[in-house]
């Protein structure tokens, strides 16, 4: 346990160095290039949010895109109001909306927007979680319920054209001004804003997984009933991690709107939600750092592949996912840690010439059956 | 006053009456052994007390509080611990982490959020020493042998420090030496804890039991000390048939 903490801290430092120095240096501190990478970093946050609920607590949330979308729309609403000035946002005019809907009014304030981008997803996630976990729903049913919610939520957003911009989403946004600084999406400063957010999110996630809270979640993942007989209110623990995960997804959505300068209902699509699961699985859902790296790698690959194979890259992504699930159920993180164990055991064998019995020390293939 | 009072307890499983009008009391600090042939309702009785199963009728009072409709985790908070027949440790956690989960005197979320998990690993050392697992603290529980797993479970019960501990066949699969050591630990526990033990090993029962309740077909057949039970004619009939 202690050693694991040191590994994770070392990994955090290496990851931070790569993100803060390595990548910008590689791109020659060019804001335009870095913008693409900032997009990956923003998506890494939603991937690590899923790692917290799926990896730590075993709750596969297929509705993660819905909470991501809420954050994204919150930010877009604020920026749309800024772009429109005193006038009504343009699409409302096209939809014959006479005056600014009440829902939009508080989004004039940036403070409210930032809070809403975190708290609305957390609240909605918490509401679903309370109903599910009080009733002791678990396993695949959590995935089904959250997926159903996602589909319904996306439908509502598309239907309510006058408020949400419908199928077109919210476009023509103003740049964000943060305490007097007008954020230039193609500047180096913006890259560091996103990178800072990701590092903060990872540090928070690491703290959670190493706290007693994280330990109880792992206990619940393995045997919820046993954990109840120790006096833990399992439903509350699950609800809290669901809220935290949803809030982080909202945060990721806000950054994503800043990167792409629009919000679209495709952010709440089933395929996007499944993509998050793929990133998380490829990186390794046991670790928030690994899940972030998974998001970055898959999106990087996607960017490169979709340039070369315009039609076929979705297929390739699918094949990669199938291979990962079949051959590395714990993702890249599992592969690396198995390799590390194997190297260490090899080194140990060389030192004491007598072979150490290694039966029963095989790495536990956790999560294969889940 | 008795710590646990079970009064006229009933439970039905789809027409099968697994426990039928069972009543007994357990005093503070007592070791009560539940005996009976297979299907007598012993495990079900433990399930009813810890909240795994809801009773169809009757009442269970723990230290004066009626707990018969209370949720399982709330009963655990009141001070009722349970060891299951199948060893149930967390195989993907280390031995020290298992004990950290078991140490649940403060099960609230806020407390858990503000504690780094490894900090109460050190507190586990004396308990691990007591059951002879001190060198295994950082091993995954899934890598322990069957006997060690049993010891870990007993260590977890000690760490949980429940006032009333329910044990389902704690010595199943143990060697004679291990059984003797378990009996010793039970006797030392009984100073501050009450134990209800379901057990088939009569020599073990003879060493630990203060009192015995014999069940048959969901009801109490006999109650008393080991001598009284061993000479009871009805008990002999129930076990040997006819």
Image (tube, grey):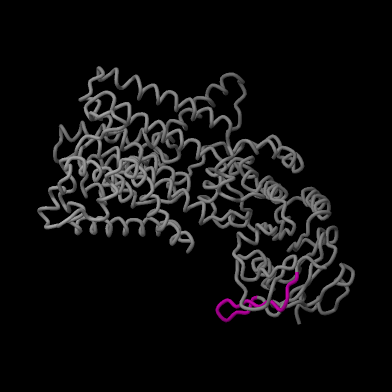
Tell me: residue A320, above or below residue B54.
above
Q: Looking at the picture, tell me which residue is in the foreground, A96 or A59.
A: A96
User: Which residue occupies the extreme front position in the image?
Assistant: A86
> Would you say residue B7 sits in the magenta stretch?
yes
Q: Residue at x 82, y 59 (%)?
A: B29
* Quarter containing the N terminus of chain B: bottom right
Tell me: residue A122, above or below residue A261.
below
Can residue A209 be seen in the rendering of this structure? yes
| Image x and y of residue B193, in percent | 78, 56
| Image x and y of residue A149, in percent | 32, 58
Query: Going by the image, does B94 lie left or right of B212?
Result: left
Query: Going by the image, does A355 lie left or right of B226?
Result: left
Q: Looking at the picture, tell me which residue is in the foreground, A282 or A164.
A: A164
Residue A147 falls in which quadrant of the image?
bottom left
Q: Residue at x 63, y 76 (%)?
A: B11
| Image x and y of residue B10, in percent | 66, 78
Which span of residues is magenta-colored?
B5-18
Query: Going by the image, does B200 lie left or right of B105?
Result: right
């Amino acid at each position: 346990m202690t050693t694991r903490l040191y590994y994770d801290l070392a990994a955090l430092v290496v990851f931070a160095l790569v993100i803060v120095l390595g990548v910008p240096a590689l791109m020659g501190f060019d804001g335009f290039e870095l913008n693409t990478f900032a997009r990956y970093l923003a998506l890494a946050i939603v991937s690590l949010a899923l790692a917290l609920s799926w990896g730590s607590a075993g709750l596969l949330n297929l509705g993660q895109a819905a909470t991501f979308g809420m954050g994204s729309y919150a930010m877009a609403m604020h920026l749309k109001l800024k772009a429109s000035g005193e006038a009504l946002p343009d699409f409302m005019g096209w939809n014959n909306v006479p005056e600014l809907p009440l829902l939009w009014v508080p989004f004039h304030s940036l403070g409210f927007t930032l809070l809403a981008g975190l708290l609305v997803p957390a609240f909605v996630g918490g509401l679903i979680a309370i109903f599910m976990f009080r009733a002791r729903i678990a396993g695949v049913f959590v995935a089904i319920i959250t997926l159903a919610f996602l589909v319904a939520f996306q439908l509502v957003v598309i239907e309510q054209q006058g408020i949400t911009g419908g199928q077109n989403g919210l476009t023509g946004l103003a740049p964000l001004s943060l305490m007097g600084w007008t954020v230039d999406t193609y500047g180096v400063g913006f890259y560091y804003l996103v990178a800072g957010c990701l590092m903060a999110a990872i540090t928070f996630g690491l703290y959670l997984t190493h706290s007693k809270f994280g330990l109880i979640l792992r206990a619940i993942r393995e045997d919820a009933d046993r954990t109840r007989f120790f006096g833990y209110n399992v439903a509350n623990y699950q609800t809290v991690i669901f809220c935290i995960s949803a809030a982080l997804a909202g945060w990721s959505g806000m950054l994503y709107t800043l990167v792409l300068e629009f919000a679209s209902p495709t952010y709440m699509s089933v395929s996007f939600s499944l993509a998050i699961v793929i990133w998380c699985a490829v990186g390794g859902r046991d670790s928030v750092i690994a899940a972030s790296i998974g998001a970055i790698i898959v999106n990087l690959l996607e960017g490169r592949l979709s340039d070369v194979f315009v039609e076929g890259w979705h297929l390739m992504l699918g094949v990669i996912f199938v291979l990962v699930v079949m051959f590395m159920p714990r993702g890249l993180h599992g592969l690396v840690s198995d390799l590390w164990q194997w190297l260490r055991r090899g080194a140990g064998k060389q030192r004491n010439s007598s072979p150490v019995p290694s039966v029963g020390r095989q790495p536990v293939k956790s999560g294969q059956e889940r | 006053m008795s710590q646990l009072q079970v009064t006229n307890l009933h439970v039905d499983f789809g027409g099968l009456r697994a426990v039928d009008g069972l009543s007994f009391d357990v005093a503070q600090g007592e070791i009560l052994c539940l005996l009976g042939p297979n299907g007598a309702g012993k495990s079900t009785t433990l399930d009813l007390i810890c909240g795994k199963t809801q009773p169809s009728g009757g009442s269970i009072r723990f230290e004066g509080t009626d707990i018969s409709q209370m949720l399982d985790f709330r009963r655990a908070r009141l001070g009722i611990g349970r060891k299951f027949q199948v060893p149930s440790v967390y195989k993907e956690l280390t031995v020290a982490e298992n004990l950290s989960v078991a140490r649940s005197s403060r099960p609230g979320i806020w407390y858990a959020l503000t504690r780094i998990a490894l900090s109460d690993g050190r507190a586990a050392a004396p308990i691990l020493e007591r059951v002879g697992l001190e060198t295994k603290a950082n091993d995954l529980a899934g890598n322990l042998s069957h006997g060690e797993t049993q010891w870990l479970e007993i260590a977890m019960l000690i760490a949980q420090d429940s006032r009333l501990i329910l044990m389902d066949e704690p010595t199943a699969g143990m060697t004679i030496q291990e059984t003797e050591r378990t009996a010793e630990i039970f006797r030392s526990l009984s100073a501050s804890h009450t134990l209800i033990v379901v057990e088939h090993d009569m020599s073990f029962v003879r060493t630990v039991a203060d009192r015995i309740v014999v069940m048959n077909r969901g009801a109490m057949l006999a109650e008393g000390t080991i001598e009284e039970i061993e000479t009871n004619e009805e008990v002999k009939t129930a076990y040997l048939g006819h």
